[in-house]
Amino acid sequence: MVAQVENVADKLHRIQSIGFTRAGCWKLSGSGLAFEFDVYAGARNVFYAFVVAGELMYVGRQLSP
């Protein structure tokens, strides 16, 4: 179990070291979820990552036309 925790921390450190920063978070809103931006709301052509409870869950890319 200790090796898994170190692996999670290593993944987060690696994405932070190449420039990933917190841009916002998901919050409950009425009958669903809403994303609340802290920064980068108007950014285009970005890479993003979802982190849940300190664990890297997904890395993706968004391309704007």
Image: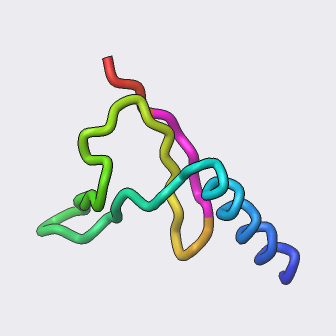
Instruction: Determine whether 22 is above or below 54 in the image.
Output: above
Q: Residue furthest bottom?
A: 2
Query: Quick check: is 26 in the magenta stretch?
Result: no
Left or right of 31: which side holds 10? right
Q: Position of residue 1 (x, y in %)?
A: 84, 82
Instruction: Determine whether 47 is above or below 9 in the image.
Output: above
Query: Quick check: is 58 in the magenta stretch?
Result: yes
Residue at x 57%, y 50% (from the top left corner): 19
Q: Residue furthest right?
A: 3
Residue at x 34%, y 64% (from the top left corner): 25
Magenta part, dominant SS: strand
Q: Tell me where residue 44 sits by quadrant.
A: top left
Q: Position of residue 51 (x, y in %)?
A: 53, 63
Q: Nearer the viewer, residue 22 or 25?
A: 22
Residue at x 61%, y 61% (from the top left corner): 56
Question: How many dots with numbers?
Answer: 0
Q: Nearer the viewer, residue 19 or 12?
A: 19
- Asked which colour scheme the image uses, the reply is rainbow
Q: Tell me where residue 38 sits by quadrant.
A: bottom left
Q: Nearer the viewer, residue 60 or 41?
A: 41
Residue at x 32%, y 38% (from the top left corner): 43
Q: Residue furthest top?
A: 65
Q: Tell me where residue 7 sits by quadrant.
A: bottom right
Q: Position of residue 35 (x, y in %)?
A: 27, 58
Q: Which residues are magenta?
A: 56-61
Instruction: Determine whether 56 is above or below 60 in the image.
Output: below
Q: Position of residue 10 (x, y in %)?
A: 76, 65
Q: Which part of the image, by quadrant, shows the C terminus?
A: top left
